[in-house]
Amino acid sequence: MITVEALTKSFGSTRVLDGLDHRQAAGETVALIGPSGCGKSTFLRCLNQLETHDTGRITIGDLTLEGGRAATTEQQRQLRLRAGMVFQQFHLFPHRTALENVMEGPLHILREPRAEAEARARDLLAKVDLSARADHLPGQLSGGQQQRVAIARALAMRPQLLLLDEPTSALDPELRDEVRSVLRQLAEEGMTMLVVTHDMQLAREVADQVVFLHQGRVAESGTPEAIFNAPTHERTRDFLRKVRG
Amino acid sequence: MQIAGLAVASGRRSHWSFHRRWRCLHLALIALFSLPLLPARADLSELRQRGVLRWGNDAEGGAPYIYHDPDHADRLIGFEVEFAEALAGRLGVKSEFVQNNWDMLVPALGDGTKFDVIIAGLERSPENLGKLAMSRPYFIFGQQLVVRAEATNFTSLDDLRGRAVGVLSASGSHHLVERHGGIEAKVYQDNVNYFRDLEVGRLDAVLTDSPIAQVNLVGNTKLKLAGKPFAPGYYAVGVRREDPLLLAKINEAIGALIVDGTLERIYTKYALWSPEQMALRDWKADDSVIAQTQHSALRDWRTYLPLLLRASVTTIWITCAGMVLAVVWGLALALFRMYGPAPVRWLSIAYIEVFRGTPLLLQIYFIYFGLAQQLGLKLSAGVAAVVSLGLNYAATEAENYRAGLQAVPRGQTEAALALGMTRALAIRRVILPQALRISLPSVTNDFIAMFKDSSIVSVIALVELTKEYQIRAIDSGDYIGMGLMTAAIYFVMSYLASLGARQIERRMNRDHR
């Protein structure tokens, strides 16, 4: 499903990704953890080309993007259509209702008929338990509700893969659960997901595999049990000690 | 007054700071009042003591009255310059020219602070005699029609029904055309531009004082005189009513200049002499027709208000059409500047800087006169006004939009792109709607400002509210009453516009938290 080979990315003289490799099968959910500055968010942003990688190769489904030579904007767009994105700060369109946010892509990018797009958008809002809020503007929703709308918006594009950049970090602790349970449900339904997170509970609940990133490379990976209970890498142990307080 | 100041200064020592403050105030008041007061008493003895006769005119008046010597650009010549010098010489003083807008000369004479007399082709008309004292005439002129060389059927005002005729604002010709009725009077601020507009076909004729017609047609093959001069009039020196002594001396001096042939010599030099001028010698005042005494224009609101309202329609449509152009073109400029390829971006920046960095007045002249002259692009005054205001304000609006576009968070663009939108779609569906809401208050502000800025288009013979005010204020002599009516109309327009703007803002923000 996803194959990433020898990915590098520098910002000025700082090398953020340093030969990162990653493989992920369809239907698998991977949690990407690591200290800040380890490159996990940059990695995620490379996967849907909000950042362009310097060298290496990204393959999602049947599409491969080589680093080094600039991908065309159309190639980038094709990659984004395959990999939906959910942001830490939601980034809902503030001038459109929850329903309109979810319909926006199908209607204007996929050019689906309005009735079809709306019916599906309502289904998706029901799925994230927000049917009652369909006509609310983002400003009238709580953070947890906004994030669930954002997930529905990404799903509306029928992506092969969902990228989630710290989906619970901006939420108050009591609101995180509603997002976690939506993601848990998606994982059970077989959605392929890559989640960057500091929320260890989320990683434990949804991930089939946990990947620990250090200095722009994969330092260690394994099942949640293996990583959380018996980390082999010194850095992983340090990190887990810190996040557990 | 100085003594009063000293008395206060030497007052009791206690509360000296109070006294000192009081004294400062006092001295300031003295300074304030004595500045305009000292030279104000332009009576004859004062004038003799000063040794200078200050005469008001507008150097834009042009040949043959007053104009810059083609050989020495900084020297003014013209028959009125020489007449003023001769007159001052007779009075035993020097002559000093004071520049003033022609159509504001009468009010500017006021209390004689700026200048002592007006020598500026001012007609000895009942209207003018209602406002100030006038000397015996120093020049006899007629009204002269000027038409394009190929025109054959225009020889009198009667032939010009329904046609556009150019006249000088508040001049005798202006009154004549208005009184004649059925003719579309196009009002100009100077004696040059209506000939241009006649040449390019915006006017069918110009009605003007015969000396202006004669001089401007020298060497001009495109225009010709039509018919004989008619409605004779007299140029006379305008003097304050409070100055009867000066008036008498000036009358005496003019009489002498006629008898000793000085006037004939001057007028011959400027090719203005004709036997008809001999009538100056035996001229007798017939002031039985002096116009009504002045009273407040507010009392005549039934006459003036409809005129002002009619003119405000022009203001409204120019402003609205100009703003539509500015809003649309400004948006295009902002998008070019933000998202266009490099050359388009540079062009857009250049456009914005040039239009913001040069006066609107200059742009109007350029678009109205410049394009007609150089490219034969004859925009009507209305279109030229809308285009000028629109193009000028577009630069400002573009910057408003740019501010709005930049204020939309980066995350919005990323979310739109991540969803799979092309950049163009992201701008159209996500960025622009939010940016427009942000820039809306600045844009509506500019709309209200344009109501007032639109008055500048009166320079291209478009009578909008401010110009109508000027014309009627001069007619009625009541600048305050007419000003109050005009200000009220402006206020109502601006207030309604801002109410409307607030309504739109509210509606747009309703679905935005």
Image (spheres, grey):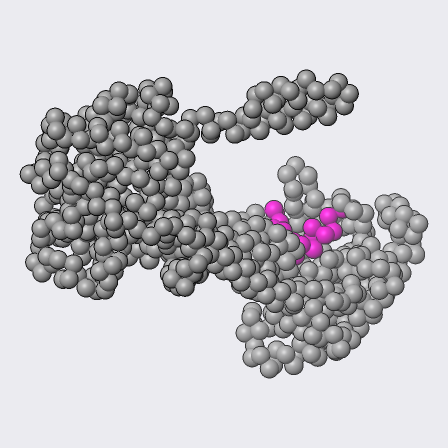
B61 w.r.t. A208: above or below? above
Residue bounds of the magenta highlight: A38-59
* Residue B316 in view, yes or no: yes
**In this image, A99 relative to B143: left or right?**
right
Q: Residue at x 44, y 40 (%)?
A: B357
Most foreground residue, B503 or A11:
B503
Examine the structure image and report whether residue A45 is included in the region drawn in magenta: yes
For the N terminus of chain A, the image quarter is bottom right
Front in this rendered view, residue B122 or A241:
B122
Residue at 49%, 60% in the rendered image: B493
- Asked if residue A183 lies in the magenta stretch, the reply is no
Task: Tell me which corner region of the image, top left, top right, bottom left or bottom right, holds residue B218.
Answer: top left
| Viewer-nearest residue: A41 or B365 | B365
Going by the image, does A1 lie left or right of B363?
right
Q: Locate residue A73, reporting x and y percent.
A: 53, 57
Q: Quadrant of residue A45?
A: bottom right
